[in-house]
Image: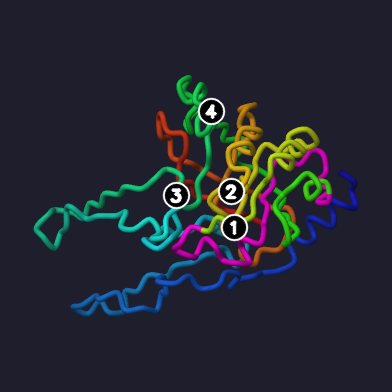
Amino acid sequence: MTPLFLLLLLSSAFISTATTAYPSIPGTDSTTDCGLSGGDENLIPIRREVYGNGRIFDISHRYTADMPSWESKDGIGQFLWLPKSMKNGSLANNSEMKLPTHTGTHLDAPGHVIDRYFDAGFDVDTLDLEVLNGPALLVDVPRDKNITAEVMESLKIPKGIRRVLFRTLNTDRRLMFKKEFDTSYVGFMKDGAEWLVKNTDIKFVGIDYLSVAAFDDLIPSHLVFLEGRDIILVEGLKLDDILPGIYSVHCLPLRLLGAEGSPTRCILIK
């Protein structure tokens, strides 16, 4: 990477304070009455997307019943229950949840699409946290096509960049805020995945919908990425209104023994 290119990237990443960077999220307005009583009406929680005066961005989606789920028209539906409630005499509130491991902001382990890796135990607990944490480049993908070899070449991602977050038309269309799964989302075609593997040092591939691979090239693209077991796919990222450039990314999956995917909390830090 040339010093000038690095300077431009760093400059773009540090320009804006962006204390109100994200659009409001339906159903999470912090001014809504929480139904508290007994003098607690003012105990209203604040839900944020940006922290530290615009320095820390939460790029993971908030789980709601209406968030999209793979090939579903009805979202994920109810995923959280309160079987033990203080209102019903329990000593404490204790919730339970049930949802697919590839829901919302999540990542894929090699066993997701390669059965011999699943049988061998290459689950989310085997993924390299060093890959999931460190300097990352946020890039805007041309909005009129999937991520092909031609598109990858046009992005001119320098050698040495190991983590890239690809913002696409999915963000503009707010697909992660729509209940019904949309097969027209933007993702990698097989030749785009092959170009990335052969011509870059990228080991962290992040994207802004439920799959890094385009629907029409779903398994072939995944196989290209995951066959070498050195690339981690992070899907369903929330990249609204963040300037392109260099950040520090931090993603931590759950340590789910035997699971080929996991919900993941991801943040960007300027």
Q: Which mark is residue 184?
A: 1
* Figure check: 25 above or below 192: below
Q: Is 18 positioned to the left or the right of 181 in the image?
A: right
Instruction: Give the label on residue 215, or none.
Output: 2
Image quarter hosting the N terminus: top right
Residue of label 3? 103
Residue at x-position 47% and y-position 53%: 104
* 156 relative to 33, above or below: above
Label 1 is placed on what type of residue? Ser
- Inspect the magenta stretch and tell me whether residue 220 lies in it: no
Image quarter in which the C terminus is found: bottom right
Q: Nearer the viewer, residue 90 or 254?
A: 254
* Sequence-wise first label, 2 or 1: 1
Mark 4 Cα shell of 10 Å, populated few (<14), some (14-19), many (≥20): some
Residue at x 35%, y 74% (from the top left corner):
44
Residue 160 forms part of the magenta stretch: yes
